Image (tube, rainbow, N blue to C red):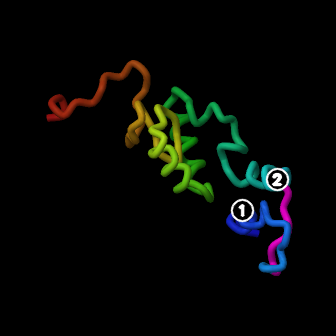
Amino acid sequence: MRLTTLLDTLNQDDTSSCPTATAVTRQEFDLLVATLIPCREHDSELWFAESTRDVEQAKSLCQACPVRQECLAGAVERGEPWGVWGGEVFVDGVVVPRKRGRGRPRKSESTAA
């Protein structure tokens, strides 16, 4: 059963409008979501890690997430200060292409030349 079908049937008492849908309790839904969404299945600290390796692992886990786009859109809307959201890294509320390790100097266009 697709996640969207579960969401549609979660709060419905009558499933006669959709013969393939089944009534799903909140507990069943939470259990299923926990197995489908990586940030619920793995240690949540991974999405707020300091090490570049852990951040890259979190980003790669996000790639198969069924709610990745919604997660990213919500994080942008909320201006999340930091962490991995929807497969992207946020630093100071802005999406950055790659997290730089602690103690590394900032990239400057003037020094790149």
Q: Is residue 102 left or right of residue 34?
A: left
In this rendering, would 66 be left or right of 75?
right
- The residue lying furthest to the top in this view is 103
Number of the label disc, if any, that sits on residue 7: 1
User: Mark 1 falls on what kind of element?
Assistant: helix
- Tag on residue 26? 2
Most extreme residue toward the front is 13
Say which of 110 and 75 sits in front: 75
27 lies left or right of 83: right
What is the crowding at mark 2: few (fewer than 14 residues within 10 Å), some, or many (at least 20)?
A: few
Judge by depth and name the residue closer to the eye, 15 or 99: 15
N-terminal-most mark, 2 or 1: 1
Q: Which residues are magenta?
A: 19-26
Which mark identifies residue 67?
none
The quadrant in which residue 1 appears is bottom right
Residue 14 on image: x %, y %: 84, 72
Q: Quadrant of residue 13?
A: bottom right
Q: Residue at x 69, y 35 (%)?
A: 43
The residue that appears at 57% across and 42% down in the rendered structure is: 58
Q: Amino acid at mark 2?
A: Arg
Residue 71 on image: x %, y %: 55, 50
Q: Is residue 43 above or below residue 59?
A: above
**Main secondary structure found in the magenta portion:** loop
Query: Based on the displayed image, in which of its 4 quarters is residue 15 positioned?
Result: bottom right
> Would you place residue 80 above or below residue 72 in this image?
above
For marks 2 and 1, give the CA distance: 10 Å
Residue name at image x 14 percent, y 35 percent:
113
Q: Residues within 10 Å of mark 1 (few under 14, many from 20)?
A: few
Q: Amino acid at mark 1?
A: Leu
- Image mark count: 2
> Residue 59 or 84: which is nearer the viewer?
84
**Residue occupying the point 48% across, 41% down:** 78
